Image: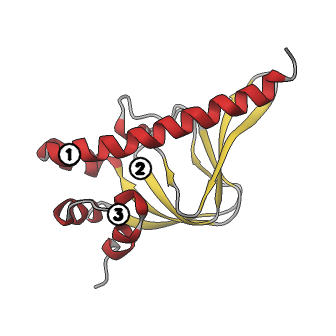
Amino acid sequence: METLEPLLAAHPFFKNLEESFLKLITGCASNVRFEAGEFIGREGANADHFYLIRHGQVSLQVASPSRGAMVVQTIGEGEILGWSWLVPPYRWTLDVQAITLTRAIALDGKCIRAKCEENHDLGYELLKRFTQIMVQRLEATRIQLLDIYGTHA
């Protein structure tokens, strides 16, 4: 039976990851599909997975009582979606909605956290990689908020 390991190994996020770590992570992976308009995550809901987007586009949104849903970033093929599975209380911090049909590899956060507890080297390696994604997302959100509110100052 073919596994998702070759697809994960080819992705830049997993580049140069030890082969033993990649095998552990592959055991937590599965293919998923989201229809256009479907919510992948809702702010405050359990964040049990992160995703490697293989096809499609996804919007990251902040709900505003006065403005409704504000898109702070759009991500697509080849990008990683979700880091809330890594940080307690493991809840989505944004709404996440598929803009188009989206195919992804879902990685089970509970499964990976358990493996990281058993192997702290794996946990440290993933934390370093996710920290970069978190910084990029915060910067994109900051720029988007400046764009939204900067013209009203």
Q: Mark 2 points at which residue?
A: 49
User: Alpha carbon of mark 1 to alpha carbon of mark 3: how far?
Assistant: 15 Å
User: In this image, 123 relative to 44: left or right?
Assistant: left
Decide: is 109 above or below 31: above
- Label 1: which secondary element: helix
Please name the amino acid that badge 2 sits on: His
Q: Position of residue 119 (x, y in %)?
A: 13, 47
Q: Is residue 111 above or below residue 31?
A: above
Q: Along the polypeptide, which appears first: circle 1 or circle 2?
A: 2
Disc 2 to disc 3, C-alpha distance: 9 Å
| Residue reaching furthest to the top | 153
- The N terminus is located in which quarter? bottom left
Whether residue 114 is visible here, answered yes or no, is: no
Mark 3 residue element: strand
Work out how far the residue at label 1 is from the one at label 2, CA to CA, in angstroms. Answer: 15 Å
In front: label 1 or label 2? 1
Circle 1 is placed at which residue position? 116
Kindly identify which residue carries mark 3. 29
**Residue at (16, 46) in percent of width and height:** 121
Give amino acid for label 3: Ala
The C terminus: image quadrant: top right
- Residue 91 shown left or right of residue 23 in the figure: right
Residue placed furthest toward the left = 118
Identify the mark nearer the N-term, 2 or 3: 3
Q: Which is closer to the viewer, label 1 or label 3?
A: 1
